[in-house]
Image (tube, rainbow, N blue to C red):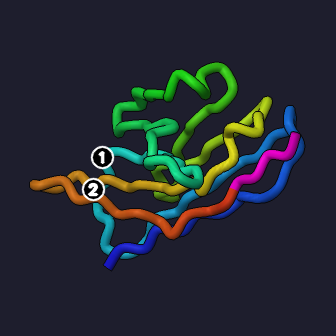
């Protein structure tokens, strides 16, 4: 069993900052990638940022320069520092953990709400 737990969401004014955390526990063994996705009402879930085991990162164009993803391998934890938040960043943010197995397995957290007021 693998547990994925997000924290750090909340309500913030436009221009503010939030830091999301996601911790994986249980029979996770080795992690290949960790990422953040978001889903706004009426929209599809989209990639926000991810980071693979070698440290390479990828960001959605809409968050480049404002968001930073990082990971602590020893703690099986991934962070998303969100600065200069905009109302359009409002969504439920989900953490995805990809296990380094064959085949690779994905585990998702329950989501954390981020609301940015104008």
Q: Quadrant of residue 7?
A: bottom right
Please report contact status of discs 1 and 2: CB closer than 8 Å, yes or no.
yes
Q: Which residue is mark 1?
A: 32
Q: Which residues are magenta?
A: 114-118
Badge 1 marks a residue whose secondary structure is strand
> Which secondary structure dominates the residues rendered in magenta?
strand
**Vertical position of residue 94 compared to residue 47: above or below:** below
x 86%, y 32%: residue: 15
**Vertical position of residue 115 compared to residue 112: above or below:** above
* Rendering coords of residue 82 (x, y %): 71, 38
Q: Quadrant of residue 85?
A: top right
* Rendering coords of residue 103 (x, y %): 11, 55
Taking the magenta stretch, the answer to whether it contains residue 92 is no
x 38%, y 55%: residue: 97
Badge 2 marks a residue whose secondary structure is strand
- Which circle's residue, 1 or 2, is located before the other in the chain? 1
28 with respect to 57 (left or right): left
Classed neighbour count for the residue bearing mark 1: other residues with Cα under 10 Å, few (<14), some (14–19), many (≥20): some
Q: Nearer the viewer, residue 111 or 42?
A: 42
Q: Residue furthest front?
A: 42
* Rendering coords of residue 98 (x, y %): 31, 53
Q: Which residue is mark 2?
A: 99
Quarter containing the C terminus: top right
x 49%, y 28%: residue: 59
Classed neighbour count for the residue bearing mark 2: other residues with Cα under 10 Å, few (<14), some (14–19), many (≥20): many
Q: Residue furthest left?
A: 102
Q: Residue furthest bottom?
A: 1
């Amino acid at each position: 069993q693998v547990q994925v737990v997000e924290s750090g969401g909340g309500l913030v004014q436009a221009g503010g900052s939030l830091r999301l955390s996601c911790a994986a526990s249980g029979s996770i063994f080795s992690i290949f990638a960790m990422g953040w996705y978001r889903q706004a009402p009426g929209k599809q879930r989209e990639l926000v940022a991810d980071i693979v085991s070698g440290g390479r990162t990828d960001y959605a164009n809409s968050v480049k320069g404002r968001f930073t993803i990082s990971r602590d391998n020893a703690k099986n934890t991934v962070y998303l520092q969100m600065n200069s938040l905009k109302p359009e960043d409002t969504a439920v943010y989900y953490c995805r953990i990809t296990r380094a197995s064959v085949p690779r397995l994905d585990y998702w957290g329950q989501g954390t709400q981020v609301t940015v007021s104008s």
